Structure formats: structure tokens, C-alpha cells
Image: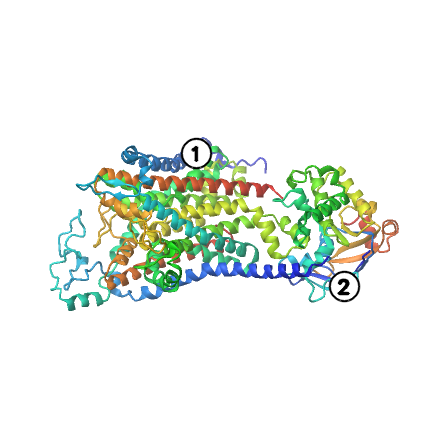
Amino acid sequence: MTAMYLSQLTPFYGSRQAVKPVDMHIRANTVTAIIGPSGCGKSTVLRCLNRMHETIQGAYATGSVRLGDADIYAPDTDPTLIRRQVGMVFQQPVALRTRNIYENVAVGLRLQGMNRKADLDAAVETALRQATLWDEVKDVLSKSGMALSGGQQQRLAIARALATNPSVLLLDEPASALDPIATASIEELVTQLKKEITIVIVTHSMQQAARISDETAVFMVDTSAGDAIGELVEMGDTTQIFTQPADARTESYISGKVG
Amino acid sequence: MANQQPTSWSSGKSLLRHGDVPFRVSTVTLASFVVALVVLIGAIMFAASAEARQAFGLDVLTGQEWNPVETDLSPPTFGAWPAVRGTLLSALIAIFIAAPLAIGIGIFLAELCPPRLAVPLSFLVELLAAIPSVIYGVWGVFVFVPFFNTVFSEPVSQAIGGVVPQFAGPIATGRGVLVTGVVMAIMILPTIASLTRDVLRLVPNTQREAMLAVGATRWEMIWLAVVPYAQAGILGAIMLGIGRALGETMAATMLIGNSQRINESWFAPATTAASLVANELTNSVSPLHESALITVALALFGITLLLNLGARLLIWYVERGMRGGH
Amino acid sequence: MHNTRNYTWRKLVDRLMRGATVAATGCAIIPLLAIIIYVMTLGAAALSPQFFTDVYQSPEASSTPDTTTGEPAAEFNPDDPFAGIGIEEGSGDTPATSAEAEAAIYAAGPKGGVLHGILGTLVITGVGLLFALPIGIFAGIYLSEYRHERFATIVRFCSDVLSGAPSIVAGVVIYVAVVTQVKQFSAVAGSLALALLMVPVITRTTEEMLKLVPESMREAARGLGAPTWYSSFTVVIPAALPGIVTGVMLAFARGAGETAPLILTVLGSNVISMDLFEPMAALPLLTYRYTESPYPGENTLAWGAAFVLMMLVLVMNILVRVATRRRGGASR
């Protein structure tokens, strides 16, 4: 049951500020959707939540992000430890190519030193069940991950992230590279998972956000000061955002006038 | 705009169109010269080695005695095993030293190096490959061999030479298989390193991110995701490095001591196939001698050709997989 | 589950291995610097005006025949260019070899120069380039403009075979095909052997430079109705020309540094000769011979020759690197 609190989170790419300082409360065991037009910084902000943003040359962020009680941006914190607790799934379904399905899921656990077969077997099965992939792959665990379809690989990626027992799962446009049927299965999976972990999902599809999220954060691009910079415009209960948005910019975006 | 016919084309159109044929003919012809050259090289050496091959067959490469001079007591024997052994041993030592170093260099240049330093450092590494091998020879003879003797050969041979025959003394001139292998390792570093760097760069970023996202350290990401993904290409790079070491002539000739005697010690002089050919071909004492030398050269050509073929196939296969992959 | 021991170990490994890759890179840079520095400093000791203007002087001769003015001390015999000038036979003016005199010979500094080698290298490599250029450039054009044909794969593979072949093989082939047939070592035989090694360099660079020319240029020309060959010659090749020139320079640098093929085809010489069908001197050959010489004076000359050779190669490579960077392209 972990919430996240963003306080004045400001991501930079080198000298360029990407997003205006963000204050956000992500409630525990909810699905929070982050929507907005391209360039508004939604992926950037998401990647700050597990400190993946700084893996890009020259990128960094100021401010704080509290995961439960601890600030993950505290000075001596090691990002690799954060990423166990905050898992991430990317837009492109990625299977680690030189590993079979079993090892793809187990990789995070092996890194942490778990190597007893019984432990790993149990953890892999749990993760695959959570990702609703177990029944499809339980007999072919030793096959390469590349043999799966796109939707299956994405669920494999989710299983891989779930294996380390994170309290938060970040999804960066997880279904945009998938066909509608696979998309539906991912969406259903997300709705199931929120009972156990907190989920933040970036999506360019407002319909998807409306379908599966409890809360929605709307980002827009502000070009008034010259360079484009992202900005959190409004955040709140999904139904309310989509029916009675408080901010005029939200209204324009949702009704299709903008973005 | 649509009505404006470029007049220059229409006036000389037939001439220009016919120009396509000579263009294609000339390029294809000269391109096929490249193929013809390779075929010719193989054919010429095959023919010129016929005499020795028919007389001795594989014994040219496996026989232990190389005595081109006919004496009253014995006919000439052409067993190039001492040379073949020297080639293989020095190349093995070279690759054993160079492969891990070069992979490390490739990893550094592709993954860890600050971007501003990457280009100049790559240039410096590749400059090692541009230095002519005869200069490696001069430097080796006057600078490196004495240095290596003082720092390694002497102390080691005195310490463990009695127990480990490979490191047995005495050290005479210091020229031998080991020091040749070390210098050759320096020479093949750039080949393997720059190819490794290129192949690592082709690994899709999504693999790196997936690994980092489950909590891997930077090194774990590199060693457990990036390098395995590119392993076929790295293997190809190593094969090319071996090929380069096998064919190396001048540095080997100047550093290996040119002795036909097989000595177990790596500090003792030996010889290589390439230096055997370089030293004796122009002074061959009989047609059979010449033919035997060309057989040795043919074997060298054949082996490096196979290594090259294998390496290129691996690298081509890897590049294709990566360009289409995710 | 936070396994502290596991975590500390992983951090340690991470730092160690990353440091190891830096050390590995040092293992390449340090020898490079060592070689360059040694060649420059020890080679500088040999440099003098005489080094660049004079030819071979025997360490044992007390009177120095001036071979640059065409008055050789001995008749130049093409079949035996070293006749009369040798350690074994000695020239006519060899002083009586008392122990003192011998010591003096060994202690003497470098005598003579390497002008014959410099000129020879330029000529042999230049002529080799003349042989290699048409094949290399046209093959490169073919590979770029018709790159999807099956034959192109074969050509590309053969070019790779040539570039990976041991250089001694080039020498062996020309020795068998040319030198033994005409019973003569010659500069042109050396050129042919070097050409075998230079063709793949030119082919590969030409192909890559042509591939870098944006497709939009070709399409623009085609859109105007120009046939392929015309657009190639007037648009594509000129655009790639600076890159192709760098390939030629690299090929020249490669050819100039090769020794093994020349040993088997050119033999070498002690005098300046511009006759392509006779043996000729070359810098790598001189470097090799002077290294193996027992006379320290000649050893110094070896460093000097190495110095000239290395300057040639380094300057070419740096020029190429600067040229390709200025064009903004990252080429290999």
C-alpha cells in the first residue's frame, strides 16, 4: 500500500528544463493515468519516478519524490535499489534476447542473489500468473522470449517487472505498439493488478485513460516563454476530469481542439 | 512546370540513354576484377605448390624437419611443423592477451566513455592499426625485447623455469615466441576493439533500459544484457584478430628469432610460417623447395580465408538481426 | 528483501569492472604513445640534411663514393645491386681491419642517407596506386549503385578476402607470377603486389562514401530525366569525391608501410634508380635491413627510416580524420 508524493519535481535535459515543477499525489492502489499531447513531458516525469530519467547522458532532476516515507532523490540513494521497488514497462515489448522465458522473468531476482531453484520457480510462477501469462507459457518456459507475440512479450515484460515485488508499477504507453486484442488484455491486467500495487500509466489515448484509471493527471505544452516546456495542468478523479474539467486547457485537449 | 521538358535531355536523349550500358559494363567488369584477383591468387598458389603437395601432401605442414639442402646423407625434407607451431603458438598467445583487453576497450568506447572523449580515443586506438608492422619490429627489437627481458623473461625463467618448461631459460637474445605474441597482441588490439565497439553500439537501447529497470548496475547491464546480445559479432571480431595474427610477417620475423628447432620454452627462438616464406622464398635452392614454401603460403591463405569468411558471416548475421530487431 | 552483502558485492564489481575497461584502454594507448615517442626521439637522432639527400654508404668504406651524381664507385649491376658494396666483400677502400679500426666502425654514427628509399617508396606505392585505383573505384561504384545484386555480395566478399589476406601472400603471388617468369626483381612487381593490398581499401571506402550520398540527390537527378550513369558521374561521385580521396590516401599509407610483399618482389637497392623494371629501394626494406644490421650506425638509420615512414602514415591518417570530420560525416 504505497503512495507516491512528487514535490517540485523538475526534470532537466542538460541545461534545458523539460517540465515545470510538478507537485502530485499518487494514491496507493490506484491506477493514475498521465495524459497530454506529445512533448508535454509525460514520459519524462514517469521516468523520474524510478530514476530512469538520469540514465540519459546529461539528464537529471531536482525536487523530491517520496515513495512511502523515503525520498528516492535523497542524496545518497542508489537508483538501482529504487528500481526494485518501482518497476517499469516500456512502450516497445522487450524480451531480453539471450534469455529464455523463465530467465527473462527471473533476471531481477537473480541479480539480487536469489539462486535457489525452489525460490525462483515459485517467484517466476507468481509473477507470470499476475501477468496472466502463466497458462500460455508454463510448458515452454525454456523457450526463447523472442518466440512470443507482441502482446505476450509485453505481458512477459510486466511479469519481469512484477517479479521483484515492487510497490509501484510504471507503464509507459504499454499498449501503443499492440493490436486491439492485446491492448484489451493489458488493460484488463492493469485493472486486476491495482488491487495489489500502485500503478502509474502514461497513455496517449484518452479513451484508455477513461477506461482504466481512477485518477488522471493532464500535462500540456507551454510555449509562452519561448522554448516549449511541459506543465502539469490539472489532476483529479478521472470521471470528473473527463466530464467537468476545471481548467480550460484540459477542456480543449479532451474535446480534441488541441493536441 | 509539367510542360517544361528539360531540353538538354531531349536533344541528346538517345546518346545519354546508351550511356547506361557502358557504365554498367565498365563497373561490372572492373568489379569482377576483384573477384578474378582472389581466384587468381588461389589458382596461382595452388599450381605453384603442386610439386610439393604431390610429393609430400600434408607432411609439408606436419613434418618436423625443414632441411631444404640435399646432402650426401639425406634427401631434402620439407616439414614445416616448427614454423606452423610457431605461427599457431604466437597467434594463440596474442589472442589470449588481446581478446579480453580488446573487449574491455570496446565496452569502454561503446558504453562507458564520456561522449566527448569517444571519438578521439577511438581514433587513437585505430591508429595502432595504421602503424606498419616493420615499425613494430624495430621498436620490438631495440626497445620492447630488452624491456621484456628485464621485467619478465629473466625473473620468471629464474623463478619457475625449472618447474614450468614453457618458461625455462636461458634467455639468449630474448627473441622468442612469447615476446612475439605480446607484440602481436598490441597489433591486433585495434582490430578486435573497434569491431566490438561497433557491434555493441548496434545493440538496441531497449535491451539496456529493460535491464536497468529491474535494478541492474551499469556493469551488470553491460555484461548481462548488452554483451550477450552482441556475442556473435564479438566472436567474429576475435576471429578476424586471429586471422591477422596468423598472417603477421614482419614483426614476427624480426622478433621470433628464426630458429628451426622446436624448443618447449616460450623464451626460446622459433619461427613462423610467414617468416619462413619471407626468408627463404627468394633464395630457394630447388624447385621443390620453392614449391614447398608456396604450399606453406597457400595454407596460410586458406586458413585466413576461412577465418575471414566465418567472421564476416557472423558479423553480417548479427548486423542483420540487430537492424531488424528491437 | 534487501541482501546487504549481495548489494555491496555488486557495487564493488560494478566499480572494479568499469575501472578495468579504462585500464584496458590504457593498455592500447600506452604502447601507441611509447612507439610514437621512441620512433620520434630515436629517429630524430638520425635526421640530418645528409639523411634526406644521400644514399647508402657502407659503414666500412672510408672514402665515400658519391652515388647521387651518377658516378658509382662500382658498375651498377642490375642482377646484383649489392655487388661491390657489402660487408662480406668490402669495397675497394676498406681500411686494414685492426681491432681499433673495427671498433671505430662500430662506434661510428650513421653514414649516408635514405633518399633512395624515400624516392623508391613514393614511386613503387604510387605506381601501385595507379593499378589499384581503376579497379577499386569502379568496384566501389558498382557495389554502391548495384548493391542488392547477388554478384555484389560476391564482390564484397572477395574484397574482404583481399583485405584480410596476409601481406606475404601478395608477395608470393607476384613472385610466382611475375618475378620468376621474367627472372627479374623489379619495382613494378612490387607495385603489383601492393596493388593487391590497396584495392580492397579503395573499394570499401569508395562504396561507403557513395552510400553516404543522400538518396534525395539521386532521385532529384532521376526526376529530371537523367539516366543512372549521368547522375552518377555528375552528381553522386562528385559529392562523394572528398571521401573517395581519403580512401586513396589511406590506401597509399597502407601500401607504403608494407614490407613483406616487397621483400619478395623488389629486392631493394642501394642506389637511386627510377627504372621500374629493375630493383628499387624502399623505406620499409631499408628499415628492415638496417635493423638487422650489426652496425649501430645503421641501426640509427633504421630508426630514421622508421621515423619517415611513421610520419607519412600518421600524417595521412590524421589528414583523413580531419577531412571526414569536417564534412560532418562519421565514417569508418
Q: Is residue A81 left or right of residue B90?
A: right
Q: Amino acid at mark 1?
A: Arg
Measured in 3D between alpha carbons, the distance from the residue under mark 1 to the one under mark 2, in whole angstroms, is 70 Å
Please state the chain letter of the residue tagged with numbered disc 2 in the rendered image: A
The secondary element bearing badge 1 is classed as helix
Q: Is residue B129 left or right of residue A178?
A: left
What sort of colour scheme is used for the picture? rainbow
Whether callout 1 and callout 2 share a subunit is answered: no
Tell me where residue A56 sits by quadrant.
bottom right
Q: Position of residue A214 (x, y in %)?
A: 84, 50
- Residue wearing tag 1: B24
Q: Residue at x 66, y 54 (%)?
A: A113
Tell me where residue C311 sits by quadrant.
bottom left
Q: Position of residue A13 (x, y in %)?
A: 66, 60
- Residue wearing tag 2: A70
Q: Residue at x 54, y 57 (%)?
A: B108
- Name the foreground residue: B58 vs A131: B58
Can the viewer see residue A47 in this picture? no
